[in-house]
Image: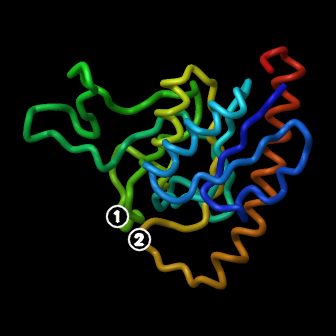
Amino acid sequence: MKVLVLCSDRAEGALFTEEEFILRVTGVGKENALLNTVLAIKECDPDLIINVGTCGAKKGEASIGDICTVRRVINRDADLTMYRLPKYTTLSADRSTEGPLDIAEEGFVLASSDTLAVTAIEEAGLYDMEAFGIAKASKALGKPLVIIKGVSDIVGEHVALKDYRKVLKKLASDLHEEALRLCRERREFGSL
């Protein structure tokens, strides 16, 4: 069983040293995430991809320190509504509408953007800068994906860098534990 673990920064995935995990750092942003996910999939041919990392949360949806799984990813930057397309959709190469990506039956809706979220949107409870790129690459290459995010901040509220670093250390440990639990559970039920 090969599990590819993707994170935007080495600190988020530093504890993934077990033999079953192949850790790759994507860099920050949807484009870096998409490109480096494709390269990692081609290199490793994993059975499962787990994206771990930090995210912001809409006030009242989750709290700092929470570990959250994601069911749907939105590209917050896609806006062709002036052409009468639904919000957060774009056109694919064959001109079909391409929009939010569903990856699980349960969990949060996460909006990915190329900039840090300073305002929340109605459609999402979590916010990051990479998950949409990872989900798009995983879907295109037919690889199952699980997204596990740790809430590091509340959208619109300032977080001091020293506080973020403290939260990140704890979240890295909790993300690792959740990924281990998920892999154990999948092995027990034969889906890994």
- Residue type, mark 2 in image: Gly
Left or right: 59 as drawn, with respect to 184: left
Instruction: Measuring from the top left, give residue 77's x and y in whole percent.
Output: 30, 50
**Viewer-closest of 38 and 3:** 38
The residue lying at 47 percent from left, 42 percent from top is: 133
Q: Foreground residue, 2 or 180? A: 2
N-term-proximal mark, 1 vs 2 = 1
Where is residue 44? Give x, y as percent: 72, 32
Q: How is the image coloured?
A: rainbow
Helix, strand or loop at disc 2? loop
| Residue behind mark 1 | 119
x then y, percent, for residue 80 = 16, 40
Instruction: Tell me the kind of residue under disc 1.
Output: Thr
Q: Tell me the distance, in whole angstroms, between the alpha carbons under discs 1 and 2.
A: 6 Å
Q: Quadrant of residue 160?
A: bottom right
Task: Characterize the local packing of mark 1: few (<14), some (14-19) or many (20 or more) Cα atoms within 10 angstroms.
Answer: few
Q: Pointer 1 and pointer 2: residues touching (CB < 8 Å)? A: yes
| Residue highlighted by disc 2 | 156
Q: Considering only vertical position in the picture, is 96 above or below 39?
A: above
Q: Secondary structure at mark 1?
A: loop
Q: Check the image and name the residue furthest to the top.
A: 190
Residue found 66% across the figure and 46% down from its top: 6
Q: Quadrant of residue 10?
A: bottom right
Of 51 and 66, the residue lying toward us: 51
Residue, x 46% and y 58% (percent of image)?
Answer: 58
Q: Is residue 42 above or below residue 35?
A: above
Q: Position of residue 181 (x, y in %)?
A: 84, 38
